[in-house]
Amino acid sequence: MSESNILHVVGAIFVRDSAVLACRRASHKAAAGQWEFPGGKVDAGETPHAALIREIKEELNLDCETIRTFDVSDTLVGNQIIRLETILCKTGEISELQSSDHDKFIWLT
C-alpha cells in the first residue's frame, strides 16, 4: 500500500502514580463508548509530536509536553491503514477534565 493509504493518528499517554489516562468516546462521536488515549490526526506538514500538542489543547484544553514516542503500530481497516503513534506526555496537575470528544475519564493501573 502507498503512503496515501495511511492515516497517521497520535495518542497521548499520561502517567500519574503508575496509572494511565483513558478517555471514553462521547455518544455523538465515531466509535462511541470506546476507550482510547486522547489525541487525533496528524495534519499534512505537521510532526506527530506537534500534532499531539495541538490535539490535546483542542480536545482537553491542556498544555502538554511530549517526552518520546512509545510505540507505532499499523492496522488495516478496509483499504485504509491506520498508523497509531502513542507518545508519552507530561502536563501540569490534572484536576478536572472536560472534552468535546469524550464523556468519561479514568486513570487505569
Image (spheres, rainbow, N blue to C red):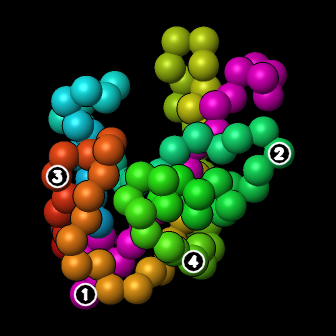
For label 1, the crowd category at 10 Å Cα-Cα, with few meaning under 14, some 14 to 19 and many 20 or more, is few
Per the picture, the main secondary structure of the magenta-coloured stretch is strand
* Circles 1 and 3 in contact, beta carbons < 8 Å: no
- What is the distance, in whole Å, between disc 4 and disc 1 at their CAs? 18 Å
Dot placed on the residue nearer the N-terminal end, 1 or 2: 1
Secondary structure beneath dot 4 equals: strand
Question: Mark 3 sits on what residue?
Answer: 104
The magenta span reads 1-20
Residue 65 is labelled as 4
Say which quadrant the N terminus sits in.
top right
Mark 4 is on which residue type?
Answer: Glu
Question: Mark 2 sits on what residue?
Answer: 45
Q: Kindly identify the residue that appears in the image at 34 percent across and 25 percent down.
A: 30
Does residue 21 appear left or right of residue 49 in this picture? Answer: left
- What is the distance, in whole Å, between disc 1 and disc 3 at their CAs? 19 Å
Q: Is residue 8 above or below residue 14?
A: above
Q: Kindly identify the residue that appears in the image at 21 percent across and 71 percent down.
A: 96
Dot placed on the residue nearer the N-terminal end, 4 or 1: 1
* Circles 3 and 4 in contact, beta carbons < 8 Å: no
Please provide percent x and percent y for residue 25.
26, 39
Mark 3 is on which residue type?
Answer: Lys
Please provide percent x and percent y for residue 19.
25, 76
For label 4, the crowd category at 10 Å Cα-Cα, with few meaning under 14, some 14 to 19 and many 20 or more, is some
Residue 95 is labelled as none
- Depth check, mark 1 against mark 2: the one in front is 2
Please provide percent x and percent y for residue 63.
50, 73
- What is the distance, in whole Å, between disc 4 and disc 2 at their CAs? 20 Å
Residue 92 picture quarter: bottom left
Question: Mark 1 sits on what residue?
Answer: 17
Q: Is residue 13 above or below residue 11?
A: below
Secondary structure beneath dot 1 equals: loop
